Amino acid sequence: MSSGDRPVLLPANQPRQFYRGGASIAALRGDASADFGPEDWVASTTTLYGRDDAGLTVLPDGTLLRDAVAADPTGWLGAAHVAEFGADTALLVKLLDAGQRLPVHCHPSNAFASAHLGCRHGKTESWIVVGTSGPEPTVYIGFRDDVTDERLESWVAAQDTDEMLAALNPVQVAAGDTVFVPAGLPHAIGEGVFIVELQQPTDFSVTLEWKGFLANADIGHLGLGYDTALECVDHSGWAKTLDSLIRRTGGDPAEVVNLFSEQADPFFRADRLQVSGSLVLEPSFAVLVVLDGEGTLGDVPLRKGSTVVVPHGAGEEVLNGELVAIRCRPPRVAG
């Protein structure tokens, strides 16, 4: 079984999804495209909702990453993290390539997930835009204005797609932009947007716009019924405060660019590493996604498209070469 003492190169892990995409993932990795491979779940200890094993990362030696972490949580995650979360990475990283607009949906909070879904984690997430295509790559974030319970219920009951989408704030995005998406915030990702997504390690989605995307409404409300599921939706208007969720980092030339504000710290952290030469990385469980160039992490060779899981027990590692990578890490904990 793989131990938590050295970085591990990971193969692609693309569980089948309900929407189109995957060409940008294939181009990044240098692999053949898949008709329904729009998500690559990197270093995943999380399964698709309602599934026993789909979505789990298999390490090169055949061990599930979930099992390897359970066998050596301190080696993989570090003592401080284990004291807070146990043998739980508290993180899921995805490459997500929207080959079509995703439906309007949101995710439950920790409190809602604990009360209704038997899980300590909800699903707050953040998007790091790493590529776009098309003339107006757009994401849709939060309602423009306050929405009443009755209005939201009527949209969902009638599956009024036009009204739901029109009620959201459209934001054009470019590579280097990041968007923080707190639990409850209604959102959709537009066609042609390619992101590295960090999120809490669940697959809980309340799909407001299910018609044309999901087989039936039951999947959209997580088996809770929409009367209960809609209680997790943030009804407030975000038009005046939208900038608090968005950062534009594409032009920052620093060697290490912190991609998120402090509001993300309780959930996850991410940096863009722009290395020319060498960079020392402190001990941490981390997921590395190489966007460009080539080099090494310790003795692990890296190239454009490489994805690597780094155990805390690997200690201080040196990143060498000429490359750009995203380093994703779990929530900040004391110690």
Image (cartoon, rainbow, N blue to C red):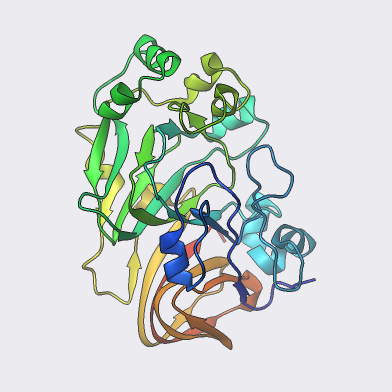
**Residue 325 vs residue 334, the one in the foreground:** 325
Residue 50 in percent (x, y) is at 68, 37
Residue lying farthest to the top in this orientation:
150
Q: Residue at x 71, y 65 (%)?
A: 74
Residue 114 in percent (x, y) is at 62, 31
Classify the position of the N terminus by image quarter: bottom right
User: Can residue 333 be seen by looking at this rendering?
Assistant: no
Q: Residue at x 59, y 43 (%)?
A: 202
Quick check: 27 left or right of 94? left
Q: Residue at x 25, y 34 (%)?
A: 169
Quick check: 241 left or right of 330? left
Please tell me in which quadrant of the rendered image residue 326 appears: bottom left
User: Can residue 314 be seen by looking at this rendering?
Assistant: yes
Please tell me in which quadrant of the rendered image residue 324 appears: bottom left
Residue 280 in percent (x, y) is at 46, 82
Classify the position of the C terminus by image quarter: bottom right
Residue 31 in percent (x, y) is at 51, 70
Please tell me in which quadrant of the rendered image residue 315 appears: bottom right
